[in-house]
Amino acid sequence: MGGPGDPPEGTPEGGPGGGEDEYRSVVFDESFVRAARLQEFSAQERIGDHAPAVRSRPPLRRGLSRQALILVLLIAVAFGTAIYMGVRHPYQSPASSGPPAEPLRMTVIPLAPQGKVPGATDTDQLYAQSPAAQFRIGAEGIPLPAARRTAHFSDSQVTNALSIAKDYIVRSALYPEVVTGDQVRPVRVLLDPDQLDQFDQSFRQPAADGRHAPTGWLVRFDSSEVELADRRIRVQGTLQAAETDSTTLEVTADHTFVYALRAAQAEQTGEASLFTVRRELHFRFDREDLRLHQAQLVVSYVQAGPLSCAEDSTNRLHPLLAGQTAKEGGPAGTDPYATGGATALCGSLAAGAQPKV
């Protein structure tokens, strides 16, 4: 049955009592309610006179909050810093704190033979009958001494300085492409950048001025005149390291090299002769040189023979070969195997420095 006052069939469709059906299509979901611009005042707020029943709510903020903006800004700053540091490279090498490298001071003294240059077809026989009989072959003749730390340099830094000096000696006196060729790059890449202009000028415009002689930088012969009769070059000498100040290490190298040579394009059965080069080199290293595996060569003192004093030994060495004699000799006999240095511009090769064949 219907309620009191209702028709037996219920409220007619469309009649005033059908409120539920009238608003059935209207849906008040949660987002609609939150977005409503009106809000009812609380009971305490309505106590006041003339207070309206409802008040307008502030509109919802469509943009980012302050915290979100700060976060975005921080991310942008961090990203920009990372890009900047990546381009700048935080591990760039610092500028060297030491003074610029000094120019190389060099002396090249030719040693003229006393009489004919001895020769033999057997290079082993030549070596065996010379003062180089007990010399080691190649880089084995340049052993590294025991490295001891100094007041301002560690054991490893001293060892590194000795190793770089040895590397320079090997490349400048034992590499066949340097000794009998025109290659200079293996030596050049080991030099401090401050000395590269002097090095390049020495080979571009050789001069006997004590600054620009290629033979002061390295050992090289004229390949059109001579060739190696034996690639097993004999070597003997010493390396010593010492600290000169709190920023500098100095390495002194004193070695004698003995080459077996014969005339270029000669028959393999042709006689060979020995050529001796005594080199005293002074290297200097700051911490930047040690880090970059490079050296400052500051002194080069060279005695070489048999040579003719009349020949120019500035650009290349022109050895006298087996059976040849010098047109003129030097003022005194100089033994490149002995300690001590010659003082003349041209010396006479001591008889004991030649093979006894």
Image (cartoon, helix red, strand yellow):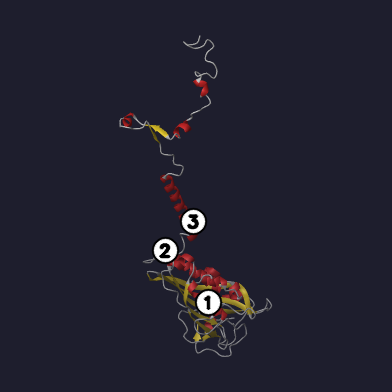
Is residue 215 in sight in this rendering?
yes
Q: What residue type is labelled 2?
A: Asp
Is 2 left, or right, of 56 in this rendering? right
Residue drawn 33% across and 29% down?
43
CA–CA distance between discs 1 and 3?
40 Å
Residue drawn 49% across and 56% down?
83
Q: Quickly name the residue at label 3.
A: 83
CA–CA distance between discs 3 and 2?
38 Å
For the C terminus, which image quadrant?
bottom right
Q: Return the x and y of residue 301 as percentages of the image width and height.
A: 48, 80
Q: What residue type is labelled 3?
A: Ile
Tag in front: 3 or 2: 3
Which quadrant would residue 234 be assigned to in this image? bottom right
Q: Which badge, 3 or 2, is on the more N-terminal residue?
A: 3
Q: Quickly name the residue at label 2.
A: 155
Which quadrant would residue 174 be assigned to in this image? bottom right
Q: Which badge, 1 or 3, is on the more N-terminal residue?
A: 3
Q: Which badge, 1 or 2, is on the more N-terminal residue?
A: 2
Could you say whether the residue bearing mark 3 is in a helix, strand or loop?
Answer: helix
